[in-house]
Every structure is written in C-alpha cells, then in structure tokens.
Image (cartoon, rainbow, N blue to C red):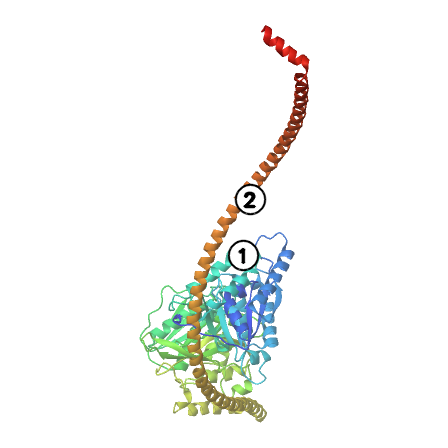
Amino acid sequence: MKAPPLPGRTERVSAASALAVAPHYDDEVLGCGGLLAQLAAGGAAVRVLFLTDGGGGAEEVEDRDAYRARRRKEAARAAAVLGLAGSDHLGLPDGALEHHLAAATQGIRRALLTQRPDLLLCPSPLELTADHRAAFAALHHLLGPLREGEGAPAELEAARELRILLYEVNHPAYPDLLVEVSGESGTLRAAMECYASQQERHPYLAAALGLRRFRTLSLESGVDLVEAYRQLALDDFTTRSPAQLLRHLGAAPPVLEVREGPAISVVVRTRDRPRLLAEALASLAEGHYRRATVVLVNDGGAPPPLPDPFPLPIVRVDLPANQGRAAAAEAGIAAATGDYVAFLDDDDLAAPEHLATLAGLVSAAEVRVAYTDAAVAIYELDPQGEGWSCRERRLPYSRDFDADLLLLDNYIPFNTLLIERRLLLEVGPPDRALPFFEDWDLLIRLSALASFHHFARVTCEYRHFRGGSHHVFGERPRERADFLTVKARVLAKHAARLRPEALARSVDTLRAELVAEREARAGASREAAQRSGELAALARAHQELARERFRFEDRYHAVNGALAALRDEHERLRLDVHRLGADSERQIQEIGKREEHARHLTAELERAAAEHAEDAEEQRKLRQVVGDQTAHLGSTYAEIERLNGLIREMESTRAWRAHQWWQRRFS
C-alpha cells in the first residue's frame, strides 16, 4: 500500500446530518470532537452512537454499575458542550466488542436507517485499542455485502452517497484530510472536563491535543490544532475484503492461519510475466488458508523464478510450447491432487481471506462448487515511473447462481471459484478449441451436474491494465474482433440446453434489470435536471450576491474608514484612561498615606483626650483644695482682723499706755 501524500492544507467539512460511531464514552471528544462541534455549530444534526457500556473492561473498578452510570452521565454533559442533537447507546460489554460484532453491526445499521446521515465518522482500523478496531470491523460487516441491483436493500439506499471519515484516537493513521480545530480548543477542553472519571485515570486530553498539534507539522505556521481523517466511500468497502481494506489504509492485516479443512490445489497459469506472477504468488502467500498447494503452469514461456522461501508447496508444470488458456488449465487440473481446485491467473490477486472463505463454503453439505465476488481493478502506469497504480475499482459481477442465465452470459469470474476436483474430472477438460471463454464453457458444463453456492463477499481482484497487453480481453473486451464470434460458438455449443421457458425467464430477468437500470438512470437524469434548475437558480442568486457584494464593499470601505477613525479615537481615549489610571493610582496611594496619618492623629487625640480628662480631674481636685485653703485663709484673716481690733482697743486704753510708759521707763 502506498500511503497518500500528507495534506499541505486544511479543509472545511460540511454535512446536513452526521453520525459518529464511538466505541467508548469519550472517543467522540478525543477523536473527532472538534469537527463534531464545527458541524453542530453550522446547523448539522449530529448524533453519536456509543457501542459499549462504559463498564471499564479490564480496568480495576470497585462498583461497575455506578461506574457505568457515571460515564453515561458524563457523555450526556459532553454532548451538551459539543452541541450534539443526541446520542444512542448499544450497551455492549466494554473491552469485548470483537465478540459482539453482530450486535454492533445491527446497531450501526439501525442508526443509518433511522438517521440517514450524509456523513459517518468511525475509528481507524489502525487504532491500538481492540474495541476501536472492532468498531471498524462492524462497519465493514454492514457495508461490505451491499450490492447494486433490483430490489436494492434499504441499507444500500442509506449508504450509497455516504461519506465516511476515519478518525484517530490513540494511533496516527495515514490521513488524506486535515481539519483545523484551533477555534474549538475551548470546547474540546470543556467537553473533556465532563469526563472526569477518565481524566482521573490518564491525561487523555493532553494526549489528544498533542496529536492534534503533531498534525500541524505539514502546514504553514499559524495553525494550532488539526484533526486528521481518512476519507472512504461505499465502494471502498464493497470492492475490498476486510484484509484488503486494512492494507489499503496502511495496516498490516493479522495472519490468522487456518490449517484444517479440505485440501485445495490452486492452479496458476502464467507465461512470460514474472513480475505479475510474483504479485499473484505473494497474494497467495499472505493468505490465511494453509492446506493448499500451488500448481504453477508455465504455458511455454521462459521458466519463471519462484520465491524462496514460500509458505505453500509449489508443483511446477512447464509446457514445452504455448498451448493456450484451455490447455494450461487442463494441465493444472491434471496435476492437482487436492479435494478442491481453485484458479488464479498471474495477472490477478487473491485476498488473504479468499481460500479460507471458499473452504468454509464447501464445508456445507452437498456444496460442490462455491464462488465469491471479484472486484475489477483498473491499473495505470504511474507517471513518476513507480509502476502500475490502481485508479479505479468496481463490482460489475455479483450475482447469485442462475443456471439458465449462465447459458446466455458468464457472470462468474474464474478466480472466484472453488470446484470439487472429482466434479472437474467428471465434466471433462476445458475446450481447447476455444481461444478464450473456455472458463464460461466449463462452468456451463459444471452447472448441468451441480448447483453453485454464491457468497456475496469480495475475496479477490480481477485486474485490467490500461495501455498494456496483460489481459486476454484488455479493458474493453467487446472491442476484440473475435469477441462475439467466440461467444456465439459457446452459445451454439449449448443451445440444446436453452429451452424456450429458460430463455424466456432469462431474457425477462435481464430485461427487468435493464428497465430498473434505465429507471435509475432516468431518476438520476431527473435529479440532475432538478439540480441543474437549482444550479441555475443558484447562479442567479450568485449574481445578485455579487451585486450585493459590490454594494457591501462600498459600505464596507466607508464603515472601515469610520472604524479607522474610531480606532484612533479609541487609542487616544485608551492613553487618556491609562494616564488617568496612573494619576488615580498615585492619588489612591496619597490618600492611603493621609488615612494612615489621620489614624495616627486620631490615636494621639485619643491619648491627649485621656490625659486632658486626667488633668481636668486633677485641676478640680486642686481647685477644691485651693477653695478649702482660701476659705481657711479667709477665716484666719478674719481672726487676725478681730485680734487686731482687740489690740487697737487695748492700745487705746490707759492701762496699755501706762504699760507702755512703764516698759520704756524701766527697760
């Protein structure tokens, strides 16, 4: 498998309705949460189908019922954050989804038929977690068997135009689509915060964001987060077996060796195409079935080199000269020893499941011939000189067995068949008189002896090479000059078996299919005409939008000028506000200082008031003492004045004067 070139740009994804298949609660956020949020924001009806019950599988959990209930509630909260329209829950055992593929397949089927989405998201099969790979396997189980034709099932109608994106959670895939989700970073974080039970166990969000950042490496700077997807369509599932699709996506399919069952001889016809032969043998070497032997018939070419080692025994049959397709097939059948014989020409490929699938089919009672489907692959030479590259795959041959219809046309590619060897010996060798259509002639003869069992699964590849001469018919077999001549010989050879009733029924079947195909084309034409009218209306609307756009641009330039003036004014105001803010800050600091000073003054005033109160009390006491002393002095002065008065009275007496005389006389 050649990996697609890593995209160098991101793209937008749109859808009216989208369905995300999530094996576990939180896979929808970790794998494709950004895209889901974008789609929901854009008006899409987005739903999630959770496959498992959230019980934790092999994790150590104390109360699994409580754990399941908690995780389901977390999923509901995350859905609200993402803007989802709703979610559905299959409730299959966590960690064991591979053992419940049938139930998972039916659950996806119901969701497709109910919702009819135009976009489906599913985990990549390259994921490390087994449940993630099992989810993809369930999708292949559903889509792989869908076939075009009359009475197409409802599943086919629901899936025909379905766009499928594979997302990655825990292993990088090989993407061909990148979606920028930088703007959804906050939504992803908020959604994952809802899953607290998981974040407690492991930093899942950090890992998911890391993977999204890793995906920006192929882009120019400026993109922070990117989700990577691989795009598929219905044809990728219907034209490839599970193992082939895994290889196409870059995975190595598991080798599940089957060593029990009938012995099979695989007849490989070749002539001077060693490179193609090596590819055909390599496809057999990768097969699961090991009870097989390769009978290599070299039809007169140079002896081809054989791979060594090779897991299957190889029996060589070298014809001395080129004898044609029928003779080479006859030689291979003669050399075969297995219970059953398969055929693989050197320009075709077998899927790993091919022989094992056929061996399982013939194990049923009375099944002597079984066949599957082959995808027709168109190859072109790579312009870079890297060999042949597959450019187109289709499934033109997928029809249940109809012996009468086989008489008119061959609808069974020879490399899809497994035929009982005894039946081949009984019917006789391929007709050497036919340069081609020998396989169709052989099948007609076989159908006279046994019914064929058809299993509608692609297990091999029928290859055409544009511009090459590798195929007997080329890409357009009807352009061979002898195509109709040889076909007429086969029809004439078996004309006796084509009874009128059988011919009428076969023609009616083909006619009904042709009518159905024409009706489908007519419906497609009507739809195309309707779309053409819609496109014309859209063109007119586009013209009006263009005129409106010019008017809008004029208004835009005027508004833009006003906005520029407003931006200048805003910048001036911003600077003023900045200055005012600085002034305010200084004033606030000054006020703080003054308030601190006021607090100190208040404290001083309170202390002074207390001291003043003490002084007032002391002054009151002093005044009391002074008053008492003043009263005492007053009484003393009054007594002194009284005594002075007595003295004056005494001094005015004769006795006192006599005393004074006496005192002077005798002193």
Q: Nearer the viewer, residue 474 or 246?
A: 246
Q: Amino acid at mark 2?
A: Thr
Helix, strand or loop at mark 2: helix
Question: In the rendered view, would you say 25 is above or below 516?
Answer: above
Q: Position of residue 356 (x, y in %)?
A: 50, 69
Position in image of residue 642 (x %, y %): 68, 22
Q: Which residue in the protein does label 2 denote?
A: 602
For mark 1, what is the residue?
Answer: 199
- Helix, strand or loop under label 1: helix
Q: Position of residue 169 (x, y in %)?
A: 49, 63
Crowding around mark 2 (Cα neighbors within 10 Å: few <14, some 14 to 19, many 20+) is few
**Image height check: is 388 above or below 208?**
below
Q: Tell me what residue is drawn at x 49 percent, y 70 percent.
A: 166
Quick one: label 1, few (<14), some, or many (20+) residues within 10 Å?
Answer: some
The quarter holding residue 389 reads bottom left
Q: Kindly indicate the quadrant of the structure image that contains residue 561.
A: bottom left
